[in-house]
Image (spheres, coloured by chain):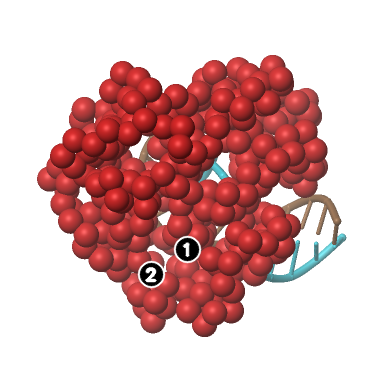
Chain colours: A red, B cyan, C brown
Amino acid sequence: MKYNLNTEGNKVIMKNLKHFEPKHVFECGQCFRWEIEEDGSYTGVAYGKILNVRKDGEDIVFSNTSLEDFEEIWIDYFDLNRDYGEIKNKLSKDPILKEAIGFGHGIRILKQDEWEMLISFIISANNRIPMIKKAIGLLSESYGEYIGEYNGRKYYSFPTAESLKDKSIEEIEGCKVGFRAKYILNSANMVCNKEIYIYGLKDLSTEASRNELMKFAGVGPKVSDCIMLFSMNKYDAFPIDVWVKRVMEYFYLKEDTSLKKIQEYGRDKFGEYAGYAQQYLFYYARELGIGK
DNA sequence: CAGCAGGTGCAAG
DNA sequence: CTTGCACCTGCT
């Protein structure tokens, strides 16, 4: 273990933790259940637990947790054993990525739950981040379980496939997911019927896993790559949304290019680090409005 | 009020 | 295989 842990009441503190900036981690488009508090810290729910995360100088303070939960859940969730220094060194050989990494230096790719990512990214298709957050919040309040209160707000776990599968289209639509309600119900049923075992997909190749994911209605190339990147440690996945398309065309390709061609270009250029490259480029492009 | 955001499914070339 | 259009919702 490379990290230095202290505990203090319901807090776990990691001293001198590099490559971790809460704003970059939680606002780079990979997660939808974290909100900023008045003091600049972030509170969110994952794996049925409420956590608050704050940067304090060189340290990161994880509040509302225990050492046990920290080691059981949050080390994997934040991928704290990953050497981001090495990843950044490799990618920084490319001058454009060097710039993007300087901008989003504190990004870490989270290891989130497969089922939650499947549904979250189905909702994300043709949708904007505030709407996606709203829909996921409504789904959780309506069909998840109440797990507790933090700083005056109530929190709910993400609903299980079992808890959604027998709901009506209208009930799911009530959570403001729009035309995606049928995809959500269909996915819940496929998972409950064990047509696809989503927790086994991380053991398949990226290609095979993508093919399985795209059997879910509402999951295409972009959504499948997001699910793999954010819940299966598949760091060669390269999801291309409108911002990544813009930034790739603006800096690399210099002309309008099909998604298929950009996918091939990204895979060839960034290889096993394509997912990290994508994340730095996405955050850079989106925050700065590059290529718009 | 129309226009826009911005992935996927589906039909047609 | 590639292209063009419809689609919920909410904000301009």
Q: Is A143 rendered above or below residue A232?
A: below
Quadrant in which the N terminus of chain A is drawn? top left
Q: Nearer the viewer, residue A25 or A126?
A: A25
Q: Is residue A121 left or right of residue A257?
A: left
Outermost residue toward the front in this view: A1
Q: Position of residue A220 (x, y in %)?
A: 64, 58
Residue at figure coordinates x 60%, y 36% from the top left: A276
Can residue A97 be seen here? The reply is no
| Label placed on residue A160 | 2
Can residue A101 be seen here? The reply is yes
Q: Is A87 rendered above or below residue A30?
A: above
Residue at figure coordinates x 43%, y 47% from the top left: A77
Read off the chain for label 1: A
Q: Position of residue A172 (x, y in %)?
A: 38, 69
Residue at figure coordinates x 24%, y 47% from the top left: A66
Q: Is residue A21 left or right of residue A239?
A: left
Q: Is residue A123 left or right of residue A58?
A: right
